[in-house]
Image: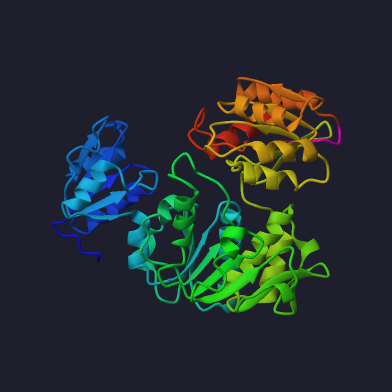
């Protein structure tokens, strides 16, 4: 594949945030573009009017995948690559790819890619900020970009990148499923059950994650505390940087070892960062720093790491402090769309939080979460489609004397949590579910939570 798509018939499936710039890119490079989406387009949208004027043919509605042909099929990450219509197009000679795969093929910059079930956005952000600080200190004009599953698409910027630049990319299992290229440095923060409402099973999900390094990564950063990532240690054929919150240097095996000792994050025997200096709460964020340090090892100085730890307050919707009202602190962790994320969030606070849970489930069991809630939360407020499933799991775990409130409406649920709270308490939105029963995405859910709290 190359940047000359002159006369090539390109089908773009899905009109989401990354595929609209993709259509622009393909048109600018001579492609004949058809765009397909289950939802009808808004013909009054100026962007759609421009696309129509430039010859883009739209096929929308129930039959949006029907009669697909052409040279290239670009799928949205949310579309499975094995749906019959896509499989038929590939059988007829089309190349199946995506916006992210095209970016990987064209990008001249050194790519640092992060995936994982939990912690990937924070780790991606930390990696980006560390490389950015190092580039600024060097003052040599090197540029650092960040994107992928976080922020803006990077494809529109690929032609301004050079071999001297860095691109930090967050990748989901959806994006990785058909990926045929790997980054220079690839990290897996952890792998736990997730997205099993989309993937056929845990094995498919796990193999998709492994794609982050399997096509030529030079450096692989692995979590020794997670069974599915630790299983890859010694098998990647790359420089392996291994990190752990619980193991000593002697118990780790890798090219480089990152671990905690005497209150410091250490790398191969050298103290790099005092854990107490990390501003964002939670043990899992210590692991995120370890992973980012592994990704940037040899590219940044200790001073860059220390400065970031003391100043970085976290990413929006991830244990984000909203405000304190009547002595009660409210935190927005709307990103927590799986039980494992909520379990990690529960361990972040000095007091047991009043937890707000619920949404659309991912076909991941809530049994482990229920046990954690009983031991780590003060009370539970349930809402959304999965509220009864979570309540059933709580009953099985033995919640007879544990305060549980169920509310149909999201606003009512937040108000119920407020009514349960007393001065000194923490109210935490950590849903353990996706937002798609009531919101477009977790960001909209988190903003709604903040709007309601800010009106208290």
| Residue 3 image point, x, y percent | 25, 64
State the scheme by which the image is colored: rainbow
Q: Is residue 171 shown left or right of residue 276?
A: left
Position of the N terminus, as image quadrant, is: bottom left
| Residue 16 image point, x, y percent | 37, 43
**Residue 162 seen anywhere in this rendered image of the structure:** yes
**Residue 136 seen anywhere in this rendered image of the structure:** no
| Residue 443 image point, x, y percent | 55, 39
Q: Which residues are magenta?
A: 423-427
- Which residue is depicted at the point 71% across and 63% down? 309
Q: Is residue 363 shown left or right of residue 25?
A: right
- Which residue is depicted at the point 73% across and 38% down? 371
Q: Is residue 75 shown left or right of residue 223?
A: left
Image quadrant where residue 321 sits: top right
Residue 322 versus residue 166 in the image, above or below = above
Q: Give yes or no for residue 222 being in the magenta stretch.
A: no
Query: Hey, which residue is sitting farthest left in the picture?
Result: 7
Q: Is residue 298 shown left or right of residue 203?
A: right
Image quadrant where residue 123 sits: bottom right
Q: How many marks?
A: 0
| Residue 280 image point, x, y percent | 72, 54
- Which residue is depicted at the point 51% across and 31% down? 439
Residue 128 versus residue 357 in the image, above or below = below
Residue 172 versus residue 16 in the image, above or below = below
Q: Give yes or no for residue 426 being in the magenta stretch.
A: yes
Q: Nearer the viewer, residue 419 or 227?
A: 227
Q: Nearer the viewer, residue 313 or 181?
A: 181
Image quadrant where residue 230 sits: bottom right
Q: Main secondary structure of the magenta part?
A: loop
Query: Hey, which residue is sitting farthest front in the picture?
Result: 396
Position of the C terminus, as image quadrant, is: top right
């Amino acid at each position: 594949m190359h940047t000359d798509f002159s006369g090539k018939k390109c089908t773009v499936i899905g009109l989401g945030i990354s595929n609209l710039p993709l259509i622009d890119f393909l048109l600018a490079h001579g492609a004949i573009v058809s765009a397909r989406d289950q939802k009808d387009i808004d013909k009054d949208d100026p962007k759609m009017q421009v696309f129509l004027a430039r010859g883009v043919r739209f096929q929308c509605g129930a039959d949006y995948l029907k009669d697909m042909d052409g040279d290239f099929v670009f799928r949205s990450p949310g579309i499975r690559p094995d749906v019959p219509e896509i499989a038929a197009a590939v059988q007829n000679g089309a190349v199946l790819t995506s916006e992210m795969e095209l970016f990987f093929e064209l990008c001249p910059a050194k790519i640092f890619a992060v995936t994982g079930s939990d912690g990937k956005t924070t780790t991606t952000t930390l990696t980006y900020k560390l490389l950015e600080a190092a580039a600024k200190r060097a003052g040599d004009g090197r540029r650092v970009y960040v994107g992928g599953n976080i922020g803006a698409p990077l494809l529109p910027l690929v032609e301004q990148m050079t071999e001297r630049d860095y691109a930090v990319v967050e990748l989901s299992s959806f994006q990785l499923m058909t990926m045929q290229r790997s980054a220079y440095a690839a990290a897996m923060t952890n792998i736990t059950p997730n997205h099993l409402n989309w993937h056929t099973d845990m094995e498919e999900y796990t193999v998709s994650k492994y794609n982050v390094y399997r096509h030529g990564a030079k450096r692989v950063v692995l979590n020794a505390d997670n069974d599915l990532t630790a299983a890859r240690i010694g098998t990647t054929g790359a420089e392996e940087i291994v990190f752990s919150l619980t193991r000593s240097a002697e118990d780790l095996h890798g090219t480089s070892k990152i671990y905690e000792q005497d209150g410091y994050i250490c790398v191969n025997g050298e103290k790099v960062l005092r854990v107490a200096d990390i501003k964002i709460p939670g043990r899992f964020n210590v692991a995120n720093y370890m992973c980012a340090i592994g990704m940037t090892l040899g590219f940044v100085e200790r001073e860059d790491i220390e400065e970031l730890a003391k100043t970085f307050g976290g990413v929006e919707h991830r244990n984000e402090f909203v405000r304190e009202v009547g002595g009660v602190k409210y935190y927005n962790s709307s990103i927590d769309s799986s039980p494992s994320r909520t379990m990690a969030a529960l361990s972040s606070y000095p007091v047991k939080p009043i937890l707000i849970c619920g949404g659309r489930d991912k076909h991941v069991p809530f049994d482990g979460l229920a046990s954690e809630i009983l031991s780590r939360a003060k009370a539970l407020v349930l809402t959304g489609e999965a509220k009864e499933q979570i309540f059933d799991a709580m009953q099985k775990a033995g919640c007879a004397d544990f305060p549980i409130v169920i509310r149909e409406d999201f606003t009512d649920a937040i108000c119920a949590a407020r009514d349960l709270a007393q001065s000194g308490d923490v109210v935490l939105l950590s849903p353990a579910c996706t937002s798609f029963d009531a919101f477009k995405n977790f960001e909209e859910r988190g903003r709604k939570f903040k709007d309601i709290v800010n009106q208290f």
